[in-house]
């Protein structure tokens, strides 16, 4: 254990922040760059190899996001493996112990979800989501830390035969962590943030602190947390990306209501743009199946669209609830269980959400491959049976206009961008 004022390389130890089973964390001062930092140093008596700590550094370096803690440096100093990180003010666990306004809590909740969603977008399961691993910085900026220790902690838990850990999902406690496990843990963190209470097994609804939660949060937000804390992973959000999409829609709806009340207008969405969206839905909703909203502008979009036709945002329906029985783990669009490949992003292998069978009413064409001749749904990019790219441009029922770049059908009277290739739409 290092002592105050002791030097290790260019760092001068100020004091110890925390001590865990695998490493100690110190507050230190960088004597060369003249800044305060946090040092994480593995314990000398741990049986864990340095490869695991190297993995944490590599993962944290890969994830560049405002709400993820930045690793400043990592090196061997005096036979110690030292990880230098940004130094925050306190952990979310410390902040929860004091009174917090609903607006501040919702702001921190949004940052917590955004950090985990970014990790999930890069196919990284954190496995150790808890208030202690969220660090607060000046300006109430929240950052997620401690990547790379999840599997080590899990092996320690299994080997020691310890009881239930506060934020761990049931399937993770049995050694099968998945994206939904992080969603479960984050749901408990947010529940405690808003209610001041941490629910315990068997997580039967309504849980402890429910009255305080309903007093602070809107019913839609309470329902979102309830879905995140379901015991069955299949009933939770697929990952934090989908959870973030749901949270952003709730927040956006609340902001619209607030603006509407400020204007004294009880009718929400009377702007020209919303009137345009309403007319588009009347004409093309059945053709496109535009049941989703763009993550950026909230315009009506479908899973098959590669870009938002209103603002050009990439994969605008990502993270939305799909009507399909399974989902593609890469592009997160809905897929059918009997397909061999994703018709939107080309890849194989899906995450099954339900065994329910859906009718095949939307098949409208056949694959151009004479050896395949599999059925195709409108606006598929690839054949889900043989992976062959769809070469014949898709027409748009009810419109004679086509994109000049890709040749696919477009609703030129409404769109600003081609939904299939993001080419700007020019109106004559």
Image (cartoon, rainbow, N blue to C red):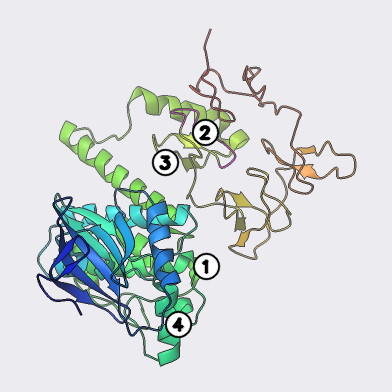
Give how far apart the Cα atoms at labels 2 and 4 are: 42 Å
Earlier along the polypeptide chain: callout 4 or callout 3?
Answer: 4
Q: Can you identify the residue that label 3 sits on?
A: 295
Q: From the viewer's perspective, is 420 left or right of 122?
A: right
**Circle 4 or circle 3, nearest the eye:** 4
Residue 25 appears in the figure? yes
CB-based contact (under 8 Å), mark 1 and mark 4: no
Identify the residue at the far right of this view.
371
Q: What range is drawn magenta here? A: 303-312
The residue tagged 2 is 307
Marks 2 and 4, the one that precedes in the sequence: 4
Residue 200 screen position, x and y as percent: 31, 81
Q: Quadrant of the N terminus?
A: bottom left
**Residue on which disc 1 sits:** 234
Q: Residues within 10 Å of mark 3 (few under 14, many from 20)?
A: many
Residue in view at x 45 percent, y 74 percent: 151
Q: Residue at x 67, y 21 (%)?
A: 407
> Which residue is labeled 4 in the image?
155
Q: Earlier in the sequence, mark 3 or mark 1?
A: 1
């Amino acid at each position: 254990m290092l002592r105050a004022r002791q030097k290790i390389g260019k760092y001068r130890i100020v004091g110890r922040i925390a001590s865990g089973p695998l490493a100690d964390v110190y507050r230190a001062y960088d004597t060369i760059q003249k800044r305060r930092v946090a040092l994480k140093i593995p314990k000398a008596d741990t049986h864990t190899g340095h490869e695991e700590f190297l993995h944490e550094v590599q993962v944290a370096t890969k994830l560049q996001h405002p709400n993820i803690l930045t690793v400043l440096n990592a090196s061997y100093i005096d036979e110690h493996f030292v990880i230098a990180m940004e130094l925050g003010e306190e952990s979310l666990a410390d902040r929860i112990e004091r009174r917090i306004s609903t607006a501040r809590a919702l702001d921190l909740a949004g940052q917590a979800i955004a950090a985990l969603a970014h990790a999930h977008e890069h196919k990284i399961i954190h496995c150790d989501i808890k208030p202690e691993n969220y660090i607060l910085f000046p300006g109430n900026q929240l950052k997620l830390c401690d990547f790379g220790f999840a599997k080590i902690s899990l092996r320690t838990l299994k080997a020691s035969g310890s009881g239930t850990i506060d934020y761990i999902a049931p399937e993770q406690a049995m050694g099968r962590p998945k994206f939904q496990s992080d969603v479960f843990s984050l749901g408990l963190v947010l529940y405690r943030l808003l209610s001041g209470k941490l629910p315990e097994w068997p997580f039967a609804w309504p849980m402890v602190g429910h009255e305080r939660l309903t007093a602070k949060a809107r019913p839609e937000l309470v329902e979102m947390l309830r879905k995140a804390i379901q015991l069955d992973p299949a009933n939770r959000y697929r990952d934090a990306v989908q959870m973030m999409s749901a949270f952003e829609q709730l927040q956006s709806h609340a902001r619209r209501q607030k603006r509407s009340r400020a204007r004294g207008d009880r009718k929400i969405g009377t702007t020209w743009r919303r009137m345009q969206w309403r007319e588009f839905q009347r004409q093309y909703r059945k053709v496109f199946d535009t049941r989703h909203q763009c993550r950026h502008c909230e315009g009506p979009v479908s899973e098959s669209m590669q870009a938002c036709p209103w603002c050009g945002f990439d994969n605008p329906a990502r993270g939305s609830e799909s009507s399909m029985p399974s989902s593609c783990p890469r592009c997160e669009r809905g897929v059918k269980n009997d397909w061999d490949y994703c018709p939107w992003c080309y890849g194989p292998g899906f995450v099954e959400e339900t065994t329910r069978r859906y009718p095949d009413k939307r098949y409208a064409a056949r694959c151009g491959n004479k050896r395949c001749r599999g059925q195709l749904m409108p606006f598929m990019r690839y054949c889900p049976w043989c992976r062959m790219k769809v070469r014949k441009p898709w027409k748009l029922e009810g419109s004679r206009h086509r994109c000049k770049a890709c040749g696919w059908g477009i609703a030129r009277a409404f769109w600003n961008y081609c939904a299939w290739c993001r080419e700007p739409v020019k109106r004559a």
